[in-house]
């Protein structure tokens, strides 16, 4: 049941995103641009390849898909009940890797922020969060 709901919502999200031509990374990029912050995209040299990087501030933003990165307490961040043996290690592995990457960044003296796909639609609060993160 849960799986069915989340799959339905997931496909609705995908449809909405496709129809506006906005992928979450792009939406976050727009917010950063509007805030007048200087940024770079996808730094392959940093652990986990953050989506948006503020090199001079040593701060990085990850934009995570709720499903693939297993967003806690999110309707889209659940392990599907079908083919659980396949999904569980895969998704838990992703989450572990994300955690390790953020820890590595911290050890390198960087700060990181995770923006979840489901938070992108709430532009105002997301703008505030990103502003606080970058300027704080
Ligand atoms: Zn989510």
Image: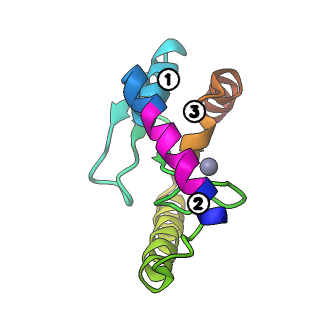
Mark 2–mark 3 CB contact (< 8 Å): no
In this view of the protein, can residue 58 be seen by the observer?
no
In this view of the protein, can residue 2 be seen by the observer?
yes
Mark 2–mark 1 CB contact (< 8 Å): no
N-term mark: 1 or 3: 1
Q: Which residue is mark 2?
A: 4
Q: Which residue is mark 3?
A: 120
Q: Secondary structure at mark 3?
A: loop
Q: Position of residue 85 (x, y in %)?
A: 46, 86
Asked if ligand 1 lies within 8 A of label 3, the reply is no
Q: Position of residue 40 (x, y in %)?
A: 34, 32
Q: Quadrant of residue 15?
A: top left
Q: Secondary structure at mark 2?
A: helix
Residue drawn at the location 35% of the way across and 52% of the way down: 49
Residue 122 is one of the magenta-drawn residues: no
Image depth: mark 2 or mark 3 in front: 2
Image quadrant for the N terminus? bottom right
Q: Position of residue 95 (x, y in %)?
A: 52, 69
Pick the residue in front: 28 or 67. 67
* Few, some or many residues within 10 Å of mark 2 (<14, 14–19, 20+): few
N-term mark: 2 or 3: 2
Q: Secondary structure at mark 1?
A: helix
Residue drawn at the location 41% of the way across and 81% of the way down: 86
Image depth: mark 1 or mark 3 in front: 3
* Few, some or many residues within 10 Å of mark 1 (<14, 14–19, 20+): some
- Magenta span: 6-15
Q: Is residue 3 left or right of residue 53?
A: right
Residue 14 is one of the magenta-drawn residues: yes
Pick the residue in front: 50 or 17. 17
* Few, some or many residues within 10 Å of mark 3 (<14, 14–19, 20+): many
Q: Which residue is mark 1?
A: 32
């Amino acid at each position: 049941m849960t799986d069915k709901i989340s799959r339905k919502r997931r496909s609705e999200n995908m449809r909405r995103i496709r129809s506006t031509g906005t992928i979450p990374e792009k939406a976050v990029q727009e917010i950063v641009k509007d805030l007048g912050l200087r940024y770079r995209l996808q730094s392959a040299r940093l652990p986990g390849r953050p989506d948006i990087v503020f090199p001079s501030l040593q701060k990085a933003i990850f934009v995570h898909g709720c499903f693939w990165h297993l967003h806690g307490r999110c309707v889209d961040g659940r392990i599907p009940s079908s083919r659980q043996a396949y999904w569980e290690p895969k998704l838990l592995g992703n989450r572990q890797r994300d955690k390790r990457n953020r820890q590595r960044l911290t050890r390198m003296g960087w700060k990181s922020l995770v923006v979840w796909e489901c938070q992108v639609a709430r532009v105002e609060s997301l703008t505030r969060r990103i502003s606080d993160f970058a300027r704080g």
